[in-house]
Image: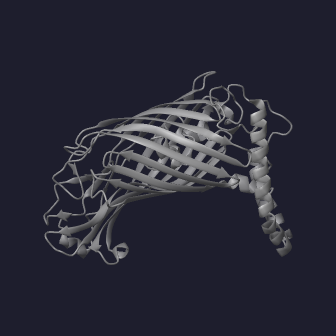
Amino acid sequence: YEIPKRDWSSDVCSSDLNGVRGDARTVGMAGATVGLADTFVAAGDNPAGLALALSLGDTHASTNRVFDGQVQDPRAAIQASSLGAALSIDRLGFSLGLTNVWDEGQFYRIGGNPTPQWIESYVREYRIGGAYRLHDRLSLGAQLRFASLIQGLGPEEGADANPTATDSALGLGLGMLYRLPKQRILLGASWSSSIRMDASGAVPSSFSALPGYAQPILIPSRLSLGAGYVPNRLLRADFTIQRVDATPGAALLGDQSRSAGSSATIEPHLGFAYTFADFTPIRGLFFGGTYLQPSRIQDQPARLHVTFGAEVKWSFLNFGLGLDRASSYDNYLASVGVDPFRIMELLDFIPHSAPPEPRGFLASPWHESDEGLAPHLRNSPEPASANSIDPFEAGRQIPKKIEKRMKSLTPEQVIDTLQGIPGAIRNDLRDVENTLKKQERRR
């Protein structure tokens, strides 16, 4: 691929071209999350879910590899990673993390020069979100987005060390989530402001190979509406529709003659999540969905995406895989997560929560039940009891319990714990076997 050596100073690059990003659930559900908003990534689209739909907490780390033939060479991977955590306590919810929201980059030859140059522009957002539940069925949320633009250009050797031009700016996201009375339906709405960055003020000397390369980058504003359905803890579904604003004057990095985002677009997203394996120590989830991506690139057709994902949770570890396929488009992702609350339970830093009765393998999701749902997704809230956990008091006791555990910890205890791991795994597998036997008897 070649880029002619000319001045691009009349153009602005767009940053909304690369499809759905995130963890196995978000990509697997085709980005249909505004009406659920029950994970760290989903809260990026609707922060209000942190105080209503999130069940205690969520941690997340993922890597996406996107191959998009409409944007650049379909053999060149576009990398996107994200890392974050979310927490819900009483009426409040919080989230903190980072995510790559846009990337274009590959090796190019400039102006006939046979030596390839690595040219890349990407935007990373650092996000801080919060939400407050005004009512048992209504929450409002906001998110501060600190966007950082990095543009690099340099020789093929040592591309990671190439000089860069950078800029940053702030954006804002607002969200609302409402659960219909005595219904299993959630209605969500969110808005994200546009963000403009310009790294052309101080560019490295190496950028002289491509005059005008350091262009302003515009993240378009986005308005989203969603409806989520949560009949029980085994099944979730969502329909989300998003309006992405126009980015006038934008063009592709590799071909400034092709405009991108000349008009606003409407994107419908539909997805579901099903827990196909439900055991006390182990859970397996399958995700599926589809979305229509109207092309924001001149003379390119709209693309219908089909998405899949799977996640396995064993004790405090979560592993996920996802796939997003469309014409001239592939997104492969892997994610990993650690449940800090499960770890603190195992170490007796916080009280143990009673798990719901396991449903086994391929249990029917066609029923309504409050069992195992987040408190404010239940039609009949659990009555307070003498064994109820005060989250603030439990949190206040954690430092004391950690200090006590560290003082009493001996090398022998560490060795005993490590030696007990095979036995704990056997016990988990035995629990799975017993659940399958009970499931068979019920049938």
Residue drawn at 73 percent across, 49 percent down = 281
Return the x and y of residue 433 as percentages of the image width and height: 76, 46
Which sits in the foreground, 62 or 12?
Answer: 62
Q: Residue furthest top?
A: 182
| Figure label count | 0
Q: Which is nearer the eye, 303 or 268?
A: 303
Q: Quadrant of the N terminus?
A: bottom left
User: In the image, is 144 to the left or to the right of 206?
Assistant: right
Which quadrant holds residue 149?
Answer: bottom left
x and y percentages locating residue 266 in the rendered image: 33, 34
In the rendering, at what x and y percent does residue 68 appear? Answer: 32, 52
> In which quadrant is the C terminus drawn?
top right
Instruction: Say whether residue 355 is visible.
Output: no
The answer to whether 292 is drawn above or below residue 79 in the figure is above
Residue 18 higher or lower than 140, as above or below: below
Q: How is the image coloured?
A: one colour
- The answer to whether residue 94 is visible is yes
The residue positioned 62% from the left and 40% from the top of the image is 276
Q: Is residue 348 left or right of residue 134?
A: right
Percent x, y of residue 300: 23, 44
- Which residue is at 59% across, 43% downward? 285
Residue in view at x 55 percent, y 52 percent: 320
Say which quarter of the image contains residue 398: bottom right
Q: Is residue 10 left or right of residue 441?
A: left
In this rendering, would 95 be left or right of 426?
A: left
